[in-house]
Image: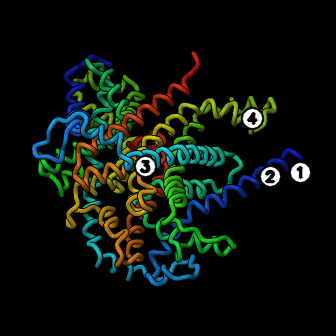
Amino acid sequence: MSSRSAARLGRSIALHLFLTPLALIWLFPLWMMVVFSTMPDNGIFSPGIELLPHGNFIDNFNNLQRDTNFVGAIGISVSVAVTYTFLSVLLTSMAGWALARYQFFGKGAVVAIILGTITLPYAVVLIPQFIMVARDFKLANTWVALIVPPLFNSLGVLFMRQSFSMMPDDLFDAARVEGVKEWRIFLFVALPLARPMLAALAIILFLASWNNYLWPLLINSQPGSMTAPVALGTLIGLTKVSWGGIMAGAVMLTVPMLVVFVLLQRHFIAGIAAGAVK
Amino acid sequence: MRNRNATAYRFLTPYLLIFAIFWVWPIISSFMISFQATRTVPWRFAPGFNWGRLIGDPAFFNALKNTLLILVIQVPVMISLALVMAVLLNSPLLKARGLYRFAFFAPVVVGEVAYSAVFRLMFNLDFGIINKLLNSIGLPKIDWFSNVTPAMALIMIAVTWRWAGYNAIILLAGMQSIPEDVYEAATLDRVSKLKQFFYITLPLLKPVIVFCLVLSIIGTMQLFTEPFLITERGGPGGGTETLGLLLYRQGFRSLNFGYASAVAYTMAGLAIAITLAQLWLTREPK
């Protein structure tokens, strides 16, 4: 072996020796979430070190369902996230299309305002949003309250604008010569071409809705209208509560997303790399 | 590209409508609310009421201090860690890259509530796995929840765990867009890998790093769920109270919208000031 390749091997070993413990530390909380979700409460709160799953998941889940209607909350979370994702992808790509493909009065201002909101904390709009939705529109504890106010997002629009502006002009011009209407060009030419970007956007938006906590906590606080994270959050800190149950809920919120992440990793990473979450 | 006002605005209208109703109006509204006494019916205009209270409120300064402390320590640590992750994940020497990527990127999909619950159990005083492991290697256990310093450390650890991989994804994408031949030329000139990192990667990555810093600062500025759920409403005794938590408490527990709006605008002012300072400090020399 030459000294060059020996040095390479040494570097490779050092790399793995450093990265492996770090990766294990990073996986540890997720692993423990799974372990806790399969342990009875007296096992979680016992002096021994337990690092392997037990067989108590179903009991824990039943305890969780006794403490709060978690299945119902999951149902709300899924329906809201699906509806939100569909509407948000549509709105966001329509706006991105307009900004990418047309020259119009006020375009610079629209882009500047969208960029400006990236640096603006959500906290600034939280209170008036709440007053408006709960008091003025009387929409607290409804699906509309969960879906509509979060529809605005800035990074998603910039992402879609960039995606559409990279498409060649002649594609759309050919359709225009044929007399195809603009909205049909958008729906039937542009959107199908943007499929990978739409997938990335949809995944990120679904995840954002699925995990959203503060807004649903404030606006849908009635037990029958809570999303799953909010329902789970109400149990944390209670004295007489099954922690195994809470962990079973945490697993049910997390594991499906992990599976999606593994299956659609490319789209996921593309969405985040573009900064598509706000 | 053609000039078509009507068509463009037809596509933009739904988006701009949502924006106007749920962002533009609230931005104006919360500014106005911050100048009103909101615990009388009807609300009355009292310009100094909330802001005057804010500058004399020890609870506000406590929350401000905690938020800035977390910001100053956690954000640089996390971004450095993310940078290390990204560089190492990008190394051609790495085997089983997919597994490592999964390990670091997985927390990105984990919700705040789920991971807050896990961290509470893991750091439990008597039964938490962290203290058991500390004990087993001969270290004393740490009371993470009843002392301020460990509680703050716990919040920072939790946030770093959740967001380091997220930033690493963005940084990694930035690194992969740096043309390969720059490194090839440097390698031919026998420039060491370490020097390549400091003289090629870092300068070319600067805009991406700034983007990550800005997003992280704005996120940490509004930190709410972790001190709300992990350290139990900002405990011990307000030791991990943040501006986000103060806003929640004032706005939605005491229903004091005026004061909460003043807190919100303070957060926005700080976020914008830090972002501008950031952009100014890292501007390209002309």
Residue sitting at x 22%, y 20%? B5
Tell me the distance, in whole angstroms, between the alpha carbons under discs 3 and 4.
43 Å
3 vs 4, front mark: 3
The foreground one among B29 and B84 is B29
Q: Position of residue A39 (x, y in %)?
A: 47, 80
Q: Residue at x 29, y 17 (%)?
A: B2
Residue B281 visible here: yes
Q: Chain of mark 3?
A: B
Residue B195 circle label: 4
Which residue is located at x 29 percent, y 60 percent?
A78
Q: Amino acid at mark 4?
A: Lys
Residue annotated with mark 3: B62
Labels 4 & 2 near each other (Cβ < 8 A): no
> Can you identify the residue that label 1 sits on?
A1
Relative to A273, A157 lies left or right: left
Mark 1 and mark 2 residues within 8 Å of each other at the beta carbon: yes
Q: Position of residue B177 (x, y in %)?
A: 57, 34
Instruction: State the CA–CA distance, disc 4 to disc 2.
Output: 20 Å
- Count residues near mark 2 (Cα–Cα under 10 Å), then give few for <14, some for 14-19, many for 20+: few
Where disc 1 sits, the SS reads loop
Dots 2, 3 in contact, CB < 8 A: no
- Is any atom of residue A254 visible in this view? no
Task: Give the left or right position of residue A7, taking residue B143 as reference.
Answer: right
The count of marks equals 4
Disc number placed over residue A9 in the picture, else none: 2
Secondary structure of residue under mark 2? helix
Mark 2 or 3, which is nearer the eye?
Answer: 3
